[in-house]
Amino acid sequence: MHIPDGFLDAKTVAATAALAAAGVSMAVYRARRTVPPAKVPLLGLSAAFLFAAQMVNFPVAGGTSGHLIGSVLAAIMLGPSGAVIALSAVLTVQALLFGDGGLLALGANILNMAVLAPLVGFALYRLVSRMIGGPRGRLTAAGFAAWCSIVVAAAVCAGELAWSGAVPWSVGLAAMTGIHALIGVGEAVVTMLVIAAVGRIRPDLVGSSAPVPSSRVSFLVYAALVTSVVAIFIAPFASRWPDGLEKVASTLGFSARALPHPLIASPLADYRIPWIESPGLAAGLAGGVGALVVLALSFVLATALVPRAQNGR
Amino acid sequence: MRLQASFHLPPSIISRLQASVKAAGALVILLGIASLPLGVPLLLIVPVVVTSAAALLSRFPPVTLLRRLLMLEPFAVAASALVLFRPDGWTAFWTLLVKSSLSLTIVIIFSATTPFGDIFMLLRRLKLPGILLTTIALLYRYLFVLADQVERMRRARAGRTFAKGRRLAWFLNSGVIGHLAVRSVERAERVYAAMRARGWE
Amino acid sequence: MALQVRDLRYCYPDGKEALKGVTFAVEDGECVGLVGPNGAGKSTLLLHLNGLLPETDAPSPAVWVRGIPVSRDRAREIHRRVGLLFQDPDDQLFCPTVFEDVAFGPSQLGLGEQEVKTLVESSLRTVGLEGFEHRMPHHLSGGEKRRVCLAGVLACRPEILVLDEPTSDLDPRAKRELKALLGGLPATRIIATHDLELVVELCSRVILIDEGRVVAEGSAGALLGDETLMLAHGLEKPHILRHRHPH
């Protein structure tokens, strides 16, 4: 999801850079308070680890391969602030030295993958692991959080591209979230497998206690940041979405309303779930259904991965 | 993807410039490219000229430059494909691709003419927070060590498997990443001990 | 007396006993070898000699460096006097360039920029690596990395040098060079190693450790030449002693 240069216009570069700076500053502030000196080298080594892990190929269909991003993995092992710092370091070095991701786009990339993804992921991880409990709950939460973090980052990425006027919102959102809903499954699976592997050797690294004590202030600040990002990059387009989709449909040469009588009445015809009027809400529900499916699948995989003796503890 | 150790060019007019000058110059050019509207391809002539001049002045062997560019292109092409849905689809696509490639070239030239130490000093002068700087320094130091470790572990595991298949590869590679995670944590503990032993508080 | 260890005991975090009452002393200027099978507790013992272990203060100290008891609040002094060379140079060489790494110790001690520079240059000269200031660690060979680490330790001007497996992973030439280097240093040296030839060549005294205890102490020739003792503790009589005629 590294955005190259040339896609984002000046105002988007400025806005994303400012938001990314805010997120990283908050993380540094928290880290200074909560990361003991003994753990400072861990941030650097973890950053190197994440970089190296991102290079490992996971074969997908037909010669292509996918890669782990590791936002949620980082958050589980380092805590949210540590993860923000480590991931920001990775993205910075990738952009400056390897040309992976643009320089101007670094703000946006850090915002999406180093701030948003680990924060959203960690929040969901805590929520779900408390709901289900035990090692199985933690694994399920890890997979689900990993998927969500990728999809949310992709949605905001689409918003940034739309803001720049480069890619129309409807297309961008559909393409980005669609593709990353699939990529997210890979991320979820690998995150779960890695956490299970680490848990077998050093359970203390992925254990039940949160790596750092939580603070209400930092939670509120992070929540405000995430909400602002969503408000800026996604909300404005949400109302325009059905129109945008109509436009895409007419460009592609057909209009859903033009279909006389569908042979089989689709419950989702006309982009509306019959008893729900707002298309935005319908889209949200579709997304929600997808998320629940991922949650269920994560639970299944987690059950398979955790030895039976540990379930219920 | 094999990690190439930092690539550096022979000394040139560009490489002799101060890191801050190079960085500022690169940013100005990148902003210029970013500001060009997508539908007007002719305006691209300016950045094309500027970028070519930079490439020449930095004594970048054209073939190497092209090869590095091609390595990173696929994502730019895929992302540019999203633009096809605009009314001015194809023009926008090519303009975007050219903009993206030119920007990438500028960054490649910058990183090939500036050693990491200079980039790091520049970041320090920009007053990036200490904990972030330490993380970046350690990241750079141990990146190649860990990349080698990953490669060795992967080869060792692959050498012991006789079945084929994607699912197996996923399990294997995840296991390798998991082991790498543990070893990295353990190494971090030893590095901390080494830092303390030489007086770090 | 440079270093004194009296009834040192230590348990790992998981409860396993690593050191079960180690006692020995080292005089100024001596070069002492510490030998024993893997798992004997050598590395753990070394970490106690410069105060890195124990993590929390024991009720009474068990290690004295020049009369100073090793404890948390005197850690800084101890670190200054005892230089520790780690087994894996990659763990100790953590800065992006050789200069920065060798300069790390002196900078932490609060020395001025010019003084640090002088120290770095002289330390690199001592280990035979002049001109290496701007090299990067991952471009160095194993032997070069070890020597940079040694330079980094020497730059702090310690009175006592503690070395953990200094010749492991080195090719024969690098081993020879390092041995010559170590032999010429004036500081008190304590070397934990499997390289028994090194011990015979450099060390006047040898301490044999097994299962967390001191099993035997004596001159290199006598202790390492005792075949029964060596075999009983997972070692063997070094070749260099095998073919000595008893004249």
Image: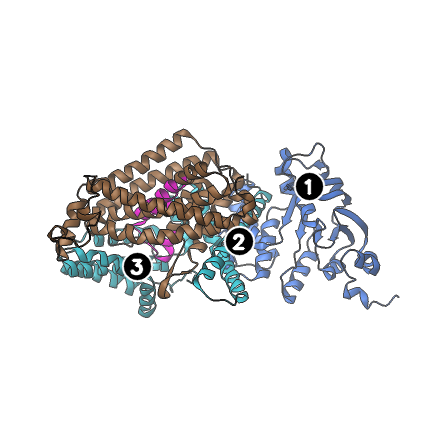
Chain colours: A brown, B cyan, C blue
Q: Secondary structure at mark 2?
A: helix
C38 is higher (above) or lower (below) than C57: below
Pointer 2 residue: B179
Whether residue B119 is visible: no
Q: Is residue A265 magenta?
A: no
Q: Position of residue A275 (x, y in %)?
A: 21, 39
Q: Which is nearer the eye, A179 or B42? A: A179
The reply to whether residue A251 is in sight is yes
Q: Which residue is mark 1?
A: C11
Q: Earlier in the sequence, mark 2 or mark 3?
A: 3
User: Which amino acid type is shown beneath numbered disc 1?
Assistant: Cys
Q: Which residues are magenta?
A: A93-122
Q: Residue B178 appears at what percent x and percent y?
A: 50, 52
Q: Quadrant of residue A67?
A: bottom left
Which residue is outermost to the top? A216
Tell which of A94 and C206 is nearer to you.
A94
- Chain label for disc 3: B
Separation of residues labelled 3 and 1 (CA atoms): 53 Å
